[in-house]
Image: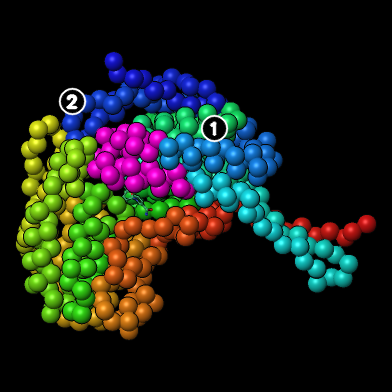
């Protein structure tokens, strides 16, 4: 029998205005569970609950928050195989990737459990004699968390854990395609001891639940990860409400390969960065910018490695690339391939819809060569297992091509030249730079974020997360 999963509002499981089946993209005949979907009324109830719970949670103290976050992190780590399997079944990344992401989510909760005990402030003399100045941080209040489908454990973890650690309450709206992981995380946090109203889960459509969050004056801040188009709507609404917001959005990340690169390393970095997790990563290496002297060898070796990849059911042992997340995303990938060919690119490998034992959204990883910077494939985010190759004469041209984009999330370079690596690190317009590494794959204890149209607001993750989830207070006291 198919399980039915409710919303969580004010510490209670609540049925929604509608329901949605959670479908396995590797096997569309497999319904994982049926999830309640909130309507506007449920979203408003969740916002009211978060607002009402905020004052008490703000005063709950670091030990309480530490213990809850640690308990939740420990449980996520202990259940890594089971939750990783749910993740792979629901989102379509491979079982190994699903378990890896679940471990990351557990680590994030443990990191922020520690952050509750690492609060800092300043006490200093005023410029006016006899007066003392204190600079402290306070929670922002009730925070809206709106997340995408591609990292259904890690992204909610790196928003919800710091929000709670720094004393905020949360209204959590996950992407429609991944309610199962969201429900699992919410349930774990409640059993770990979160008081009612501190975390409220409202699964449901962006244009209903998300819109209700944007319209609500009661939310003090919104942290969002998703597409640049939705990010713009969030920004406009937050400006109207004078509300704090943070946006992590799209990417068109370059991986530069210079003549002096280690060819094996460059091919491995491109293969991982462009195609693992089915290329559905905001940090995916979607533009491979390659200098003349290594271009042909690099393309040949990469195409060969791509053809050797096993594309199949995410849960099947040996699968290296799972399905695309749904039919819409698959159609979008195929459309971008058509446009790339129509504009003069050559499909060097992959790009075909594949049949497997079960009905799913399988696409062979695609490489488009002979592209120019002006082509659509080099300007718009595809968000699938598709990479383009740009051939350039030298390092200077490679750097210019890397920066010739409205995005600025991650950028990589493969080279054995310290001079070029150092110059690239300094001059590439991106929030994260990788030298001899894939553009995707980051740590959780250091800042994450980009520039230009990829990001807006303070960085996420690590100690830097406190910038968004706290507000600074400066107090002046004349003792006695
Ligand atoms: P999306 O923008 O369609 O949806 C993201 C979230 O916003 C979902 O929860 C959705 O329901 C909600 N939403 C949609 N319309 C809304 C509205 N009108 N009001 C409020 N909320 C609304 O993005 P997606 O397809 O889920 O995710 C893919 C995108 O996410 C890609 O562009 C990818 O680059 C980006 N992404 C960025 C990062 C990063 O850190 N920079 C990380 C992962 C994904």
Q: Residue at x 44, y 31 (%)?
A: 202
Tell me how many marks there are.
2
| Residue occupying the point 25% across, 76% down | 415
**Which residue sits furthest right?**
480
Please indicate whether residue 446 sits to the left or right of residue 68 in the image: left
Question: Marks 1/2: CA distance?
Answer: 34 Å
Quadrant for the C terminus in the image: bottom right
The residue that appears at 80% across and 68% down in the rendered structure is 125
* Disc 1 crowd, CA 10 A, few/some/many (<14, 14-19, 20+): some
Res. 480 visible in picture: yes
State the scheme by which the image is colored: rainbow
> Residue 62: x and y, percent?
65, 45
Query: Neighbour class for label 2 at 10 Å: few (<14), some, many (≥20)?
Result: few
Residue range in magenta is 79-108
Label 1 sits on residue: 192
Q: Nearer the viewer, residue 46 or 82?
A: 82
Q: Quadrant of ligand 1?
A: top left
**From the viewer's perspective, is residue 309 above or below residue 331?**
below
Which residue is identified by label 2? 29
Question: Is 164 on the left or on the right of 128, as rendered?
Answer: left
**Residue 342: percent from left, percent from top:** 7, 58
Question: Is label 2 in a helix, a strand or a loop?
Answer: strand
Question: Is residue 335 in view?
Answer: no
Quarter occupied by the N terminus: top left
Q: Quadrant of residue 164?
A: top right
Element type at mark 1: loop
Say which of 225 and 215 sits in front. Answer: 225
Question: In terms of secondary structure, what is the magenta stretch mainly?
Answer: helix
- On screen, residue 8 versus residue 130, left or right, reads left
């Amino acid at each position: 029998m198919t399980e039915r999963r409710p919303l969580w509002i004010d510490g209670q499981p609540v049925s929604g205005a509608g329901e949605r089946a959670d479908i396995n993209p590797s096997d569309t005949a497999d319904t994982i569970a049926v999830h309640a979907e909130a309507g506007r009324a449920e979203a408003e109830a969740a916002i009211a609950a978060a607002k009402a719970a905020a004052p008490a949670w703000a005063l709950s103290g670091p030990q309480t928050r530490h213990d809850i976050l640690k308990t939740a992190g420990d449980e996520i780590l202990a259940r890594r195989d089971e939750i990783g399997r749910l993740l792979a079944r629901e989102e379509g990344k491979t079982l190994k990737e699903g378990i890896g992401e679940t471990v990351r989510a557990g680590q994030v909760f443990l990191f922020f459990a520690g952050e509750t005990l690492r609060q800092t402030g300043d006490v200093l003399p005023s410029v006016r004699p006899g007066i003392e100045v204190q600079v402290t941080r306070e929670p922002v209040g009730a925070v809206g968390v709106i997340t995408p489908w591609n990292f259904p454990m890690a992204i909610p973890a790196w928003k919800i854990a710091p929000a709670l650690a720094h004393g905020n309450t949360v209204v959590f709206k996950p992407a429609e395609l991944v309610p199962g992981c969201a429900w699992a995380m919410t349930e774990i946090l409640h059993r770990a001891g979160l008081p009612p109203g501190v975390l409220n889960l409202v699964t449901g459509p962006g244009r209903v639940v998300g819109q209700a969050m944007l319209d609500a004056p009661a939310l003090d801040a919104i942290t969002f990860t998703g597409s640049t188009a939705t990010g713009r709507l969030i920004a406009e609404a937050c400006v109207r409400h004078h509300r704090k917001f943070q946006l992590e959005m799209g990417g068109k990340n370059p991986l530069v390969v210079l003549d002096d690169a280690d060819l094996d390393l460059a091919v491995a970095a491109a293969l991982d960065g462009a195609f693992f997790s089915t290329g559905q990563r905001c940090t995916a290496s979607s533009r491979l910018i390659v200098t003349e002297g290594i271009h042909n060898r690099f393309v040949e070796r990469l195409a060969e490695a791509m053809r050797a990849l096993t594309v199949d059911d995410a849960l099947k042992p040996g699968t290296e690339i799972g399905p695309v997340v749904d039919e819409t995303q698959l159609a979008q990938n195929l459309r971008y391939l058509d446009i790339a060919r129509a504009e003069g690119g050559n499909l060097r490998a992959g790009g075909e819809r594949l049949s497997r034992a079960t009905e799913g959204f399988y696409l062979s990883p695609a490489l488009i060569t002979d592209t120019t910077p002006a082509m659509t494939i080099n300007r718009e985010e595809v968000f699938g297992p598709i990479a383009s190759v740009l051939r350039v004469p030298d390092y200077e041209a490679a750097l210019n091509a890397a920066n010739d984009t409205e995005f600025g999330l991650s950028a990589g370079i493969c080279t054995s030249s310290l001079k070029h690596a150092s110059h690239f690190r300094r001059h590439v317009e991106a929030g994260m730079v990788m030298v001899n590494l894939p553009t995707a794959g980051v740590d959780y204890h250091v800042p994450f974020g980009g520039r230009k149209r990829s990001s807006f607001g303070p960085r996420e993750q690590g100690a830097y997360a406190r910038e968004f989830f706290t507000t600074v207070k400066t107090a002046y006291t004349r003792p006695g």
